Image (tube, rainbow, N blue to C red):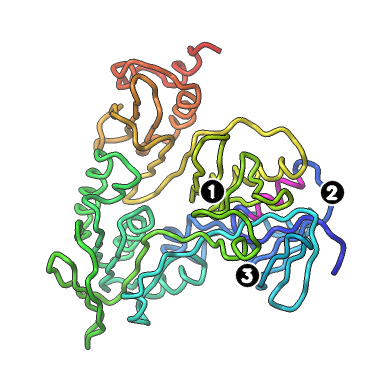
């Protein structure tokens, strides 16, 4: 074993960013970033969009060439971690090496939830989580082919949009009443449903896959509503499962993710967890929440770095994410279970916003091709602004000015 230091397991968005944050905040000790993929850390949002449309010209590395060398961050790529010993403070790798640490950060991410009925078909069935997944799917999505998508969440809708752009015929299956219904208000879900239908996507909602088979001419799915779909390619996205196996075996507290406190510290003082794998409690008495977003990975990377270095933690931020589909940039912030929604503009007729209220308090915001307004909307949400619905709906009222007018 070499000298100790900080070891980060998982070389995705969260892992790469916590390494960078530690250096930015002044840590000068050893940092080792371990990842089981052979690639330098890369961003995943482009996988369902530009990496399928124009893979050769889409950069997705999180940091520029030479960043890790310049900042003294040791990369151990293409090697998996077999086990942790949190008492001895060691990490055992599958190449036989054992590393010692002072602090450990688990950024092991999540994997696609499997559908065995589809996996049993073998070739022609895809999920999307890695660069290799994107390359395989991109090769399969040739113009004129038939794609069956199972799962109408963010990934399913982005794939549907991209496939249509590539000239692929798309059928989309989901048991919910409307696409993205679990994470958006009905008004937006209905709009997305109509938008995809207008682009030629055949949506089979309120339907589940009953059986799947390979035929002489392709792949066939039988649905619970009696429909049979024929396709050349199947892709599915039905959620993810956090990669908690190492944490469980090491004896850390786990419940739908590694349980961590406000500083992303686990049930063991020298072990932190961040990103898709972490279920964080913002303060005592609140529920543990696991968020699977690009921004959350970056945010928790800063929290963990500050926790490790004993620095003050910033105030929590309003959660935010985005999706690009059908020529629309849709950004969502706050609590999507708001009691009522105010439309600012006209949905489907140019840039607009949806603003969610609980009582009189603004708790959520959605922008459609109007991302410049999101910063002000998040400030209003963070400050628990109470604003009349008529004022929120008035496009002549500046959200920025409304935020500035709030008491300090």
Drawn side of residue 186 relative to residue 242, left or right: left
Instruction: Describe the element under mark 2 as helix, strand or loop.
Output: loop
Q: Which mark is residue 340?
A: none
Q: Earlier in the sequence, mark 2 or mark 1?
A: 2
- Identity of the residue drawn at 35% across and 66% down: 236
Residue 170 position, x and y percent, is 25, 65
**Foreground: disc 2 or disc 1:** 1
Crowd band around label 1 with a 10 angstrom C-alpha radius: few (<14), some (14–19), many (20+): many
Q: Quick one: quadrant of the C terminus?
A: top right
Instruction: Describe the element under mark 1 as helix, strand or loop.
Output: strand
| Residue position for label 3 | 36
| Residue position for label 2 | 28
Q: Are marks 2 and 3 in contact (CB under 8 Å)?
A: no
Drawn side of residue 196 relative to residue 320, left or right: left
Residue 39 position, x and y percent, is 62, 68
**194 drawn magenta:** no
Crowd band around label 2 with a 10 angstrom C-alpha radius: few (<14), some (14–19), many (20+): few
Gap in angstroms between the C-alphas marked 2 and 3: 25 Å
Drawn side of residue 306 relative to residue 256, left or right: right
223 or 53: nearer the viewer? 223
Drawn side of residue 364 relative to residue 44, left or right: left
| Residue position for label 1 | 279
Question: Which region of the structure is painted magenta?
Answer: 15-23
């Amino acid at each position: 074993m070499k000298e100790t230091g900080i070891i980060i397991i998982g070389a995705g968005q969260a892992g790469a960013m916590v390494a960078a944050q530690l250096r930015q905040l002044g840590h000068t000790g050893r940092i080792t970033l371990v990842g089981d993929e052979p690639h330098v850390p890369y961003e995943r949002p482009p996988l369902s969009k530009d990496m399928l449309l124009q893979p050769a010209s889409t950069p997705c590395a999180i940091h520029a060439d030479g960043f890790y060398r310049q900042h003294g961050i040791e990369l151990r790529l293409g090697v998996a971690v077999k086990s942790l010993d949190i008492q001895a403070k060691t990490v055992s790798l599958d190449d036989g090496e054992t590393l010692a640490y002072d602090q450990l950060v688990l950024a092991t991410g999540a994997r696609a939830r499997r559908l065995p009925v589809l996996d049993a078909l073998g070739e022609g069935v895809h999920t999307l989580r890695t660069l290799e997944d994107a390359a395989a799917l991109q090769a399969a999505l040739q113009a004129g082919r038939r794609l069956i998508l199972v799962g109408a969440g963010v990934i399913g809708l982005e794939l549907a949009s991209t496939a249509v752009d590539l000239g692929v015929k798309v059928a989309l299956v989901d048991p919910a009443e409307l696409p993205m219904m679990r994470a958006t208000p009905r008004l937006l879900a209905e709009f997305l449903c109509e938008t995809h239908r207008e682009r030629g996507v055949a949506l089979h909602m309120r339907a589940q896959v009953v059986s799947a088979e390979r035929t002489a001419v392709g792949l066939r799915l039988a649905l619970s509503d009696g429909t049979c779909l024929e396709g050349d390619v199947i892709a599915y996205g039905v959620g993810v499962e956090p990669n908690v196996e190492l944490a469980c075996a090491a004896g850390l507290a786990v419940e739908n993710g590694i349980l961590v406190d406000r500083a992303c510290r686990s049930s063991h003082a020298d072990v932190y967890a961040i990103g898709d794998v972490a279920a964080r409690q913002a303060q005592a008495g609140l529920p543990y929440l696991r968020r699977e977003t690009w921004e959350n990975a970056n945010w928790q990377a800063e929290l963990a770095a500050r926790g490790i270095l004993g620095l003050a933690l910033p105030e929590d931020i309003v959660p935010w994410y985005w999706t690009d589909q059908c020529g629309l940039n849709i950004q969502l912030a706050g609590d999507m279970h708001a009691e009522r929604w105010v439309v600012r503009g006209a949905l489907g007729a140019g840039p607009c916003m949806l603003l969610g209220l609980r009582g009189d308090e603004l708790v959520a915001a959605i922008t459609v091709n109007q991302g410049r307004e999101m910063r002000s909307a998040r400030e209003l949400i963070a400050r628990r602004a109470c604003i009349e619905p008529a004022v929120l709906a008035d496009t002549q009222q500046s959200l920025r000015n409304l935020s500035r007018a709030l008491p300090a």
